[in-house]
Image (cartoon, grey):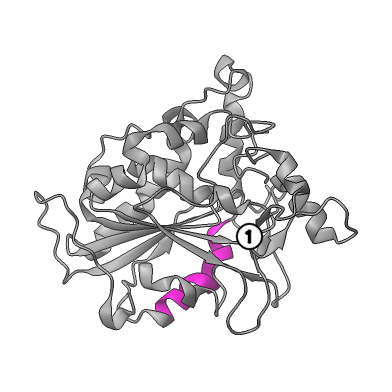
Amino acid sequence: FIHLDLIQLGNIGTFNTNTNTNTSTGTNTSRRTAVLICPAQFCVPADYDTFLSALKEKLPNLSPSSRVAELPRTEWIKVARQLPTAEFFSANLNNAKTLQWYFDAMEQGLADIYAEEGEDVNVCIIGHSIGGWVARSYLGGLGQRSTAVYKSTIDRCTSLVTLGSPHKAPSTALVDQTRGLLRAVEESEECSSEGLAAKGISVTCVGSTAVKGNIFTTNVEEIVATTSYIPLVDDWKDILSSTGINGDGIIPRDLAFMEAPSKRIEVSTCSITGNNVRHAHVLPTPYNLWDPAAPSIPLPEDFCWYGSPGVLDQWIENI
């Protein structure tokens, strides 16, 4: 199975609704903003209930139409259609063909937002893990969408925030785990931060530096981080250097950020608890196909991630 996950909003008083540069739409800063959350691999909308509630609590003017893209875990099986293809073996998978089901879920969520809000709304897309680069692919046109929803989204989307999302697929990495999908996004000018900025979309990449990979350790978290980082980075031997490789336990720091003019926000610890910021707050259950919308296994409450209180505050002003 393709491991697409590469292993697995201003203070609302001064709400950040940057005017879209597409002057044909007349986007205005008086619009309120709705959020669409693009989930991580095998995560389901229920996994983000607490996160979405926290956003609404901290941002009172956030549109109540904000939601998570509806992706039950059974949808991920559709990726398997590409396994026996020449494109898979040559690492040249096509984003539009391989990720159509994910783009469809995004568009359904966006259509629901527009149905509730009418035209008077701006959109911020928040992508967690794989959701960040898939959203980037969608906004940059690699989904090859010609729908009214896509056109409206390009007019209305003012910001993209990615949380622990890999944005690079180094050619010297030990393996291309997305089989060319992420490489195509990285190489597309329309998907670059400059290309998105030209559409009026500001980009903010949030990545953690809390978990260091370490070969010589008995710490389980460091072992998992090491096995996650080594196949992904430009030179795996960096893990042996004095500086080592840091990240969120799944995604190495250097892969989590796009080039300028995107904003780079490095987080390490929760400002409330002081605990490390890790990749996710749940353990996905891809095997639970008999109840595909059931929540994943929650990690302990003290297990902080990008959406935890005290971490959320470190980047929320960029919505």
- The amino acid pointed to by label 1 is His
Q: Residue at x 40, y 45 (%)?
A: 136
Name the side, left or right, on which 50 lies relative to 195. right
Q: Is residue 181 above or below residue 271?
A: above
Q: Residue at x 62, y 62 (%)?
A: 209
Q: Is residue 135 above or below residue 202?
A: above
Between 245 and 152, the one nearer to me in the picture: 245
Q: Quadrant location of the N terminus?
A: top right
Q: Is residue 45 magenta?
A: yes
Residue 19 in the image: x percent, y percent?
A: 18, 61
Between 312 and 252, the one nearer to me in the picture: 252
Q: Which residues are magenta?
A: 44-57
Secondary structure, mark 1, is loop
Residue 156 in the image: x percent, y percent?
A: 23, 55
Q: Residue at x 12, y 52 (%)?
A: 25
Visible residue check, residue 9: no
Q: Is residue 50 magenta?
A: yes
Which residue lies most toward the top here? 86
